[in-house]
Image (cartoon, helix red, strand yellow):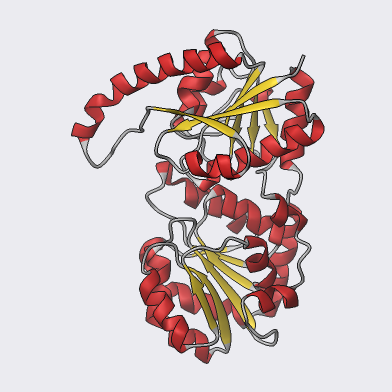
Amino acid sequence: MHKKIIIAGGGTGGHIFPAIAIAHALQRKDPSIQILFVGAKGKMEMEKVPQAGYEIKGLDIAGFNRGSLIKNLALPFKLIKSFFQVRKIFGAFTPDAVIGVGGYSTFPVLKYAQSRGIPTFIHESNSFAGKANILLGRNATKVFTATDGMERFFPADKIMVTGNPVRQAIAAMNTTRAEALQYFSLPPEKLTVLIVGGSLGARSINEAVIAHVGALLKANLQLIWQTGKTLSKEAMEIAVEHKEIWANPFITEMQYAYAAADIIMARAGAMTVAEICVAQKPVIFVPYPFATEDHQTVNALQLVNKGAAWMVKDNEAKAAAIAKVIELAGDGATRKQMNQALSALSVTDADERVANEILKTI
């Protein structure tokens, strides 16, 4: 009998990319496994999962809207509707196990599986667990976490620290710095700063670069700048004027960006943090302050407290972030110390660890 597994969740790259990495690892270990994804209609997963070669079913579900209470009136109805949709999906697919990675669709799918006695697994990518995952964790078979110290959210006997599954191309990282710089048409003799604000971009980071681009160039630095959608037009105009700057709204081949970088300035989403640990490049985090429970600051502090990163608050970014980048560029000893601290935190086989544990259970 072929094993069947449902993977539920999404909403951001931080949920989708680990989910796809886990799916790939399961299929490498047992090519006969059938995998079905369940996501939220209209969200990023509905596009990214089929691109990775998997089938996905969409639920009519949304999260709590903090900005408009009127929009939340339909939430109970959407939740009820999603449970009926889940029941139909389970009736047709009959999974042996269900994995939740966070995001709107995780809750109804895992809740239904738990009510049916089907083994459920959770992957919590952040240092601060999401509410849905905390509720589901009590009855989960196993909870995989990115970091230690998660006993305040989940039963201690269910926790397994695996790290965050990073994309295969980044985990393998077989690109040299010279090759990577060639990809961005930048010379090898200058220190390279990678600026990345997550898949949607980061206004405060972009504003800081735009305001102080002269200081960066005067310090003899060159930039690889993933702008996201915010202020991308302004950034691209600056890049046209300066050959030391490569700018684009999105970097598809992130392994080249990490290989080329000597210093990184970035948001502190769980996947970005995991990828930087694997890349082992000195980093200045500017956490997004409005993430749920301010979890990006918690993620960043995990590294700051171990001497692996610096941090600048979002509301201080425009004034202080670029000065910090220039300071780090001039401090080779601190960069070397960060490299060593990051290498101790690097996990390249989290997807394998998760896949092995699931296959042992079902």
Q: Residue 42's spot in the image, x, y percent?
A: 39, 39
Q: Find residue 144 and report its image quarter.
A: top right
Judge from the rendering whether residue 124 lies leftward or rightward of residue 351; answer left or right: left
Instruction: Check the image and name the residue furthest to the left.
Output: 70
Q: Quadrant of residue 305?
A: bottom right
Seen in the picture, residue 269 relative to 254 is either above or below; the reply is: above
Label count reads 0
Q: In the image, what residue occupies the spot 60% across and 54% down?
A: 273
132 displayed left or right of 349? left
Q: Residue at x 38, y 66 (%)?
A: 204
Residue found farthest to the top: 116
**Residue found 61% across the figure and 38% down from its top:** 19
Q: Nearer the viewer, residue 262 or 254?
A: 254
Q: Is residue 306 visible?
A: no
* Residue 18 drawn at (x, y percent): 62, 42
Q: Quadrant of the C terminus?
A: top right
Taking depth in this image into account, of 328 and 92 the one nearest to the observer is 92
x, y (%) of residue 298?
51, 48
Residue 170 visible in this rendered orientation of the protein:
yes
Quarter of the figure with the N terminus: top right
Please state the horizontal and vertical placement of residue 16, each as a whole percent of the image: 55, 41
Measuring 47% from the left and 18% from the top, which residue is drawn there? 86
